[in-house]
Amino acid sequence: MMVSVIVPTHNRSDALAHTLTNLSQQQFNESWEVIVINNNCADDTDAVVDSQREKFPVALELVYEKKPGAAAARNAGARIAKGEFLVFIDNDILTEPDFLEKHLRALQANENCWIVGAIANLPEHETSLLGLFRKSAAPVDTRTEFSETFELTGANSSLPRRHFIELGGFDENFHVASGEDRELAMRARRQLGIKTLFAPAIVGVHNDWAGTTIEDFCRRQQLYSQTEFYFWQKYGKDHPRLKLVEENLPVDLRKDSFALFIRKSLKSLLSLRGSQAVLIAACTTMEKVFPYQPVLWRLYKAALAGAISRGFHEGRIRFTKGIHTKR
């Protein structure tokens, strides 16, 4: 077996159906398989996989993982994978017919390297007011050549299975799908000297883009931010988002500058449940009544900052109570 495609999923059967239908159209002459991991799904995920299996061009496996989080789910899939190489995608990623071919050739041409592809968004998700804001806040990577990167995303990446086994897989203390992929790349670079290469021609289209309303977007960012404290515990000043961590730690009057004290205090205020409700209501109303961009963008930023701060605080409580087990 040359390639195993790992797809974790949690209550996203609608998106998963599109992903599998799209994936079945791969023009790939090597041996491959697809492994879907049911991570505590309460919807009709099993039925979707069963219906796809009948017409799928290669083996389509379904496994179960009770421990929550994409890290644990991907590890469960990798444990039964037969492929020499692992390709990771999310349950809402649409792939081009030559997607696997490009990943395999890139891996074979760059020994001791991992590959991370580009993520594109559906046009309709980028043209709304919130979509325009998010696009301006996180510009698309415009590099056109292979180049080294310190990023890795489980939504579109590939690596040799032997590396994955040697590293022990994803750190399952990352209980939500946030940071576990970047942390694995950092560990691989430190322990095995592995480089991660950005391949802009290997594109996965995100068939969701983490919500189309400011309320949903903030809710997800709050959840994603829960693992930042644990990431910082493991790597300290080498944390890739150190500024975010520093601005969301509790106030320390002995060490914090006056400017940092103000930023922390403001973020703490914005993270209050009442503040979040007011900000989201203001954003939603302004979108409909008077979408004046300069003011709306500031409201978006304030709501997002509060959600991230709230999530970071929740993660700090979780991980300082010893819920995790460090490796």
Image (cartoon, rainbow, N blue to C red):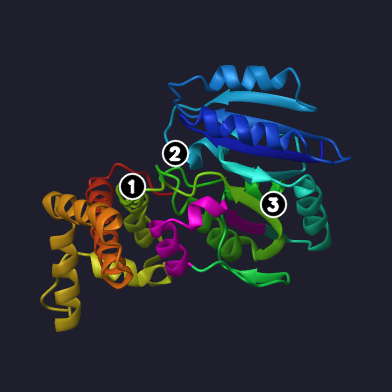
Q: Position of residue 118 (x, y in %)?
A: 63, 59
> SS at mark 2?
loop
Categorize mark 2 by other alpha carbons within 10 Å: few (<14), some (14-19), many (20+). many
Q: Quadrant of the N terminus?
A: top right
Which quadrant of the view contains residue 290?
A: bottom left
The type of residue carrying mark 2 is Gly
For disc 3, the neighbor class at 10 Å (few under 14, some 14 to 19, many from 20) is many
Provide the secondary structure element on which disc 3 rests. strand
Report which quarter residue 176 is drawn in: top left
Q: Is residue 126 part of the magenta span, yes or no?
A: yes
Instruction: Determine the residue located farthest toward the right in the rendered image.
Output: 29
For disc 3, the marked residue is 159
Q: Amino acid at mark 3?
A: Leu
Residue 198 image offset from top left, x and y in percent:
66, 65
Residue 291 seen anywhere in this rendered image of the structure: yes
Q: Identify which residue is drawn at 68% across, 58% down.
A: 114
- Determine whether 181 is above or below 4 in the image: below
- Residue 54 lies in the magenta-colored region: no
